[in-house]
Image: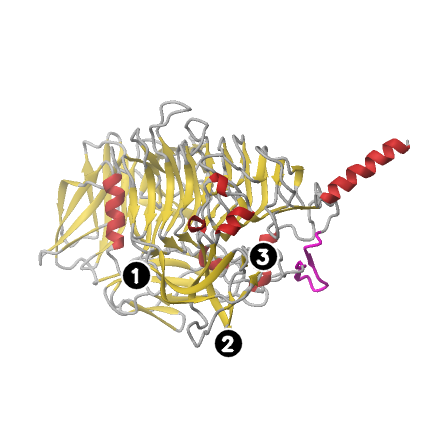
Amino acid sequence: MKHNTFRTLLFFFNLMAMGISFAQTSTLVSLDTNGRLVYAPDAKGNKIPDFSGVGYKNGEVAIPTVAVVKTVYPVAGDNLANIQNAINQVAAMPVGSDGFRGAILFKAGRYDVSDTIQIKASGIVLRGEGTDTISGTRFHATTLSQYTLLNIQGKSGFSGTGTKKATTNPYIPYGSSQVIVSSNKSSFKVGDSILITRTPDSAWINYLTMAQWGWTPTSYVISFQRKVTAVSGDTLTIDAPMVDIIDTSFSVGSVVKYKFSGIQKCGIENMCLTSAYTSDTAENHAWDAIDITNAMNCWVRKVDAYYFGYTAVTMYASASWVTVDSCKMIDAKSNITGERRYSFEIDGQRNLVQNCWTRNGRHDYVNGGRVAGPNVFYNSTATVQQNDIGPHMRWSTGILFDNIISNANQDVQNRESFGTGHGWAGSQIMFWNCKAGTFILQKPEGDYTNWAIGCTGKITNVGSLVTEPSGVVESNNIRIAAIPSLYLAQLNQRLGIGNKQSQYINFDTLATVNLGDTDFIQSCIASSGLPITFTSMNPSVATIVNGAIHIVGIGTAIINASQPGNSSFTAAPVYGQLLTVQAPLPVQLKNITATIKSNDVSINWDVADEIGIIKYEIERSTDRNDFSSIGTVNATQGKSYYFTDDTPTFPSYYRLKVLSKDGTFFYSKIVMVIENSNHSINIYPNPVSNKLTIFGLQGKSYLRIINQLGQTLSEQKTIANSFSIDLSNYKSGVYTLSISDDLGRITTKKIIKN
């Protein structure tokens, strides 16, 4: 018994020597009696950094819903020109005061793409209609060679400007938010964007024993992007703490202002991206789904990537303040070896990947070499892992892995000779409340460290090639319940959110209006019930007067809806809609419909105020893009018109070209006809005596009952998936049910009334 007791004590002494504790708390960061985070520094001031200064607009502004300024439909064959032309057209538009040109809505369908789609101007958002590969918006990379499908790229990134000042602190610890510069004399002021550069010497390389792996001082000069928040003499306070040590025994520091020459405020959202491939190990097909370079304050959200060889999203070294949210990398196709299957990669700084999911990746949540933090991976999962998660090589610093769940390894270690001399993968790396099969947690020499706090899984300091001292381990296999997410706790404390609830805005589409129309208040509500504020991005077209939209001129204006929040709610994401103002029309078109009758399609429309109109030209298209004339109806000062297409194809799109005596013309809205059923719409019972129920509706649906004379007997609209109509008062006979939706699609059903 004594021998067993001795072994048990020896086991726990070894764990203590490795820095492992089992409590449900952390000695390094905790909550005080007011619920605020408190950090415990070491003797030199090193402490866990605040990692939260990451993502779009530093996490201080929610990603907005940008107004749609152009709508695109898929075409047969290659869609590269179709997509790129739309982007180029929006790129030619002026940037609004909010920094956006507008969103391009890509309607649901498959877009085959043979080469890279380029976004090279600020303020452009690509938006789809869902991530489903069948019913959503799908960009499909067709060429069997390695290329990037979507590329967000500015001309250049950030560069120093002005006078460089040396730091005079003999030792700047990680976690510190202050640096001292030599003879500031107003060189730096509040709001300046600065680069804090750490330049190591050979002593540092030798201290880490990395010279054997080809490390040189000039290769490890790393700059950190920061903003000055306060100035007191020569002391600068910065917006995000240092995540590496500047110790004059091994390095020198400097500070310089920088300018950014790339693009900003671009986004890709709500679509799926797929790659053609020939086998599970195919190498010749689309390689990257999305690359981001020379860009800041951008986002990718709700994007699913299938079958790419390398990445779903890579943020390169000149990409900063990017948010990747609710995305997936599914079943990469490539050999399972180096430089492949890096699902979500951060090589830039101050970026955020959250709420993501992967399957069959190698390095699913990963950083490259010499990556300057902070960067955050939060609340994400990796399944069927083929390798590890963590910093990959060459001294990445200040990365938080928060609530990452994986079936295999999460590591930070000395990789020595891996690759071309990876050496130490990283320092000041935090695994917080993560779950993995195994964690390899090593620390470099001296004051540098790495942490695993509240993590579930085996934790070891035995690496893939070498055993090194263990990083700090606390609360192994017991989550830190008081701080479920370090990132969210730090963000909420920095922003002063506390227990505030989030809110969102619902803002209905703005209908086209005429110059001279009266002021109107558009339907728009905040989920909190708090009042909405409207802002016009083009006051020459519309202004806001007493909360109403006031028409000023002809053109377009983006109307943004905002709600700033209060003591109970955070600010809502801004929601924009496009307002189009046109000259008063010489005729008002009403109730444009297209209905299948026997083997024909009947196009019907009602008019009012018909002044100076010569004729109505009926145009048809099979793809909603290319229209051709199929007939003409002369204007007769009537109130109702019709035209019969006796050679229809299905599906067909119809529109009217309305021609005036003065030679001008305009187009009606587009209506669509699909033979018989549309997206599995069914009715029951039929024949019907009393109540008729319609199933399989999608979005907003408009339902009309039409008699055999073509007269509309009833009109109803709904957003429900099913809807019932009472026909008990209808006479016995045959009727037509016409169902139209927001896309202009029309489905007709024959009804027999008992």
Horizontal arrangement in the rendering, residue 609 relative to residue 700 (left or right):
left
Colour mode of the rendering: secondary structure
Task: Tell me if 95 is positioned left or right of 200 in this view.
Answer: left
Question: Can the viewer see residue 624?
Answer: no
Which residue corresponds to mark 3? Answer: 49
Residue 686, percent from left and from top:
42, 31
Rendered view: 339 above or below 325: above
Discs 1, 3 touching: Cβ within 8 Å: no
State whether the magenta stretch is mostly helix, strand or loop: loop
At label 2, which amino acid type do we have?
Gly
Quadrant of the rendered structure where residue 184 is?
bottom left
- Judging from the image, what secondary structure is the residue with disc 2 in? loop
Residue 550, horizontal then vertical, whole percent: 32, 69
Sequence-wise, the earlier of marks 2 and 1 is: 1
Does residue 36 belong to the magenta stretch?
Answer: yes
Identify the mark at residue 95; answer none if there is no mark. 1
The answer to whether residue 592 is magenta is no
Above or below, comparing residue 246 to residue 462 in the picture: below
